Image (cartoon, grey):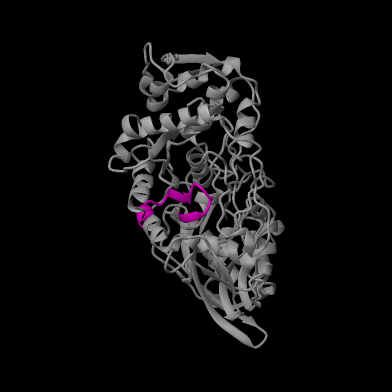
Amino acid sequence: MGSRRAAGERRRTKPAVVGSVAAVVVAGAGFGAYAVYGGQAGGDDTARTTAAAAGEKAKSGPLSAAEVTSTAQGFLTAWQRGDVAGAAAATDDAGAAKALLTGWTKDARVKDATFTAGVPAAEKVPFSVKATVAHEKTAEPLAYDSALTVVRRAGDGEPRVDWHASVVHPELKDGDKLVTGEAGAPPVKALDRDGAEITAAKYPSLGTVLDGLREKYGEKGGGTPGVELRVVRGKESKAAKASDKTLLELSEGTPGTVRTTLDPALQADAEKQVAGKARASVVLLRASTGEILAVANGGHGFNTAFQGSLAPGSTMKVITGSMLIEKNLASMDRKHPCPKYFSYGGWKFQNDDEFEIEDGTFRASFARSCNTAFISQAPKLENDDLTKQAKEVFGLSMNDWSVGVPTFDGSVPVQSAAPMAASLIGQGGVRMNPLNMASVSATVKSGGFHQPYLVARSVDGREFATASRTMSAATLAQLRELMSYTAAYGTAAEAMAGVGGDAGAKTGSAEVDGQEKPNGWFTAYRGDLAAAGVVQQAGHGGDTAGPIVAALLKNAG
């Protein structure tokens, strides 16, 4: 609510939906490439007379099934027979395609590849790859599935493969490459807090975590590298803190060893809670120390729990509430406005279902998650007040956490006018992930910020992030009471039913441009445990992320 985020995406003429056609097996040079390209298979793209150059009308309209199939077959045929120029010419970005396809044989050392095209689904064509990766005297088979999409090229409308690095391998992002050779880092044997080995087979959510641990601790743990085919991340992927990834091991290295803070029982439960929910993520911490006890993602390709950058919605009101109390702009049982609407900076903000609380208190507004109760205080705030509160008290938005694997440490930028007001309710430019929001609840419960960590600082002597101050005892007492009341009687009550003991919670729903349903958020604590979760494109936090977080806290005993 109140968010005006613009999202720019690389788009071309939208491919049309076409019916399915029979699967085709591309079988090397024996395939009729001439029929695919009308006699020009493998020719340089500049040799083709374009519709524009010939004065012809550019092709438009839906792609036919024949166009999708022949374009895909032509690309795969050329790639399979080693005709890099021909394959690149069948894409809409010949330069990028040629560079990566050249590296396929030169750097990745892949040979004897065969490609089998599957049944197209509209403009998307799946295909399987079988090949051999060879390095010196060692060779191993390689097999995986990928897919390509056919689009009309800008300008002349000719059908071409929409080029992305993921066409070559689904683990690749644009700018990444494949390399076969001595591993950049030795393998690592990661252990849980009880000394048992952690594997992705046992805990599917931890694949990306293990990649990060290897990158940082493989060598420090005493390992020696082996030879492998791996994804080497490019500039953009590194900016997103993505780790290199092993795809195939040709010769084993000697693994180093690193012990983590993960609790095997709690990790197993976290995996269970997100199972079958492709866009769900959750983190569980020990509030008094910052130890990460469990982390899980329903979709295992990206560690949203640690590296996600999402608007946190009304869970941000925990931070905003602490700031308003400190500035004497709100007090738990003092009257506080919660109108249906409030306008600021040219935007009109409203509450869910346009509710209002007449003659209510700040306690009531916090528990029911009244947006206007927070937005209405914007005229009394400086533009950097929320940023300072997030940094100084909650240790966020400073990009200095040293968890042991890559993380995004939250972002609360200084904003003005309407975006500043929107940030008070976790919209605008504010971005968080479950690790950040679990830390927020942990800060409230423990009374001060403890940087979350997966590997103890004693392993490598690194410095942990700190916050410059703590909340006053009076502010902290009110914030705990607000979260406790919300867990018992507010928007978090249904999810937290049955979670006994000293508990508090806050729900959140974050609207995202282009999404029919908001992202559902939930952050809570119970005893010395703090947790947070998000389920994207699912609805209100109390109904979606709430049951996941509450179950994890309840089952932890």
Extreme residue toward the bottom, this view:
137
Residue at the limit of the structure toward the top, as seen here: 359
> Which residue sits at x=38%, y=33%?
484
**Taking 230 as reference, is 173 above or below it?**
above
Outermost front residue: 473
Q: Nearer the viewer, residue 133 or 270?
A: 270
Identity of the residue drawn at 64% across and 33% down:
413
> Is residue 90 rendered magenta in the image?
no
Q: Furthest-left residue in view? A: 498
- Displayed quadrant of residue 121: bottom left
In the rendered view, would you say 378 is above or below 503? above
Is 392 on the left-hand or right-hand side of 316? right
Residue 277 is one of the magenta-drawn residues:
yes
- Left or right: residue 212 compared with residue 18: right
Residue 470, position in %: x, y? 59, 35
Q: Nearer the viewer, residue 150 or 467?
A: 467
**Residue drawn at the location 46% of the way across and 67% of the way down:** 194
Q: Position of residue 304 (x, y in %)?
A: 51, 50
Say if residue 23 shows up in the picture.
Answer: yes
Residue 333 lies, with reference to residue 386, above or below; the image says above
Image quarter of residue 42: bottom right
Residue 282 position within the rendered picture, expressed as x and y whole percent measured from the top left: 44, 49
- Residues 51 and 390: in front is 390
Magenta extent? 272-295
61 and 125: which is toward the camera:
125
Estimate the x, y position of residue 550 in percent, counting from the top left: 35, 45
